[in-house]
Image: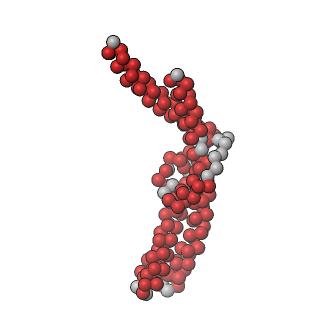
Amino acid sequence: MIKTLAMAGGLAGALAASQAPEFSQQYMQRLSGAVDELRAVALVVETGAAASGKTRDEALAELSRAGSFGTEISGTLSEQVSRYDRLSRDYQALREAEPLMRMAQVWRYNDPELLSRTWDDYRPGMPTTTDGLITAGAGFFAGWALVSLLLGGLARLIFGRRRRAA
């Protein structure tokens, strides 16, 4: 019974883990689009700052002193430029990494909006790549080991007590 359940756990682990490369790919596509979109905002801020002989931070600080509207605009632009900088670094690092190494850099999948939108639209993919097969194998082993350990420990607790009681 434990072997059958361990096999089921292994298959469930394989199925779940095999989807990591596909999710990573879909997140990368969204990340690329977000970087492209935010690049335009960063370029406007950089160009405007340079035209007035200021750094980006100096220009945003000056704008924030221009009343409540300027403060609101400055805050929004500053957030978008900061997000652009962060997402650009993440995208560049993930783009240069091999697919399996992308999954090892989980801290780079840190944008809540992109993660949520990727998950909402995610569609499972058949693991036909080497990366998908490797993660499926790792997932199978992890699922099998987890179920085996849990059920084996539970069986020892239950049957060990019965033997001691007898």
Which residue is more in the foreground, 144 or 134? 144
Instruction: Return the x and y of residue 96 as percentages of the image width and height.
Output: 57, 54
Query: Is 149 located above or below residue 27 in the figure?
Result: above
Is 121 left or right of 9, judged from the image as shown? right
Q: Residue furthest left?
A: 165
Report how many numbered discs are placed on residues in the image: 0
Locate residue 118: give its quadrant: bottom right
Q: How is the image coloured?
A: secondary structure
Position in image of residue 129 (x %, y %): 65, 42
Evaluate whether residue 90 shows in this view: yes
Residue at image location 50% in from the left, 47% down from the top: 104
Q: Residue at x 54, y 49 (%)?
A: 102
Vertical position of residue 100 compared to residue 28: above or below: above
Residue 96 visible at all: no
The vertical placement of 58 against 9, above or below, is below
- Residue 117, position in %: x, y? 57, 58
From this view, report whether residue 152 is shown above or below residue 101: above
Question: Given the current orientation, which residue lies at the most extreme top position?
Answer: 166
- Placement of the C terminus among the 4 image quadrants: top left
Q: Residue at x 50, y 71 (%)?
A: 81
Can you give x and y, in whole percent of width and height, for residue 145 in the image? 49, 30
**Residue in the foreground of this view, choosing between 61 and 146:** 146
- Which residue lies at the image location 60% right of the left edge and 59% below the top edge? 30
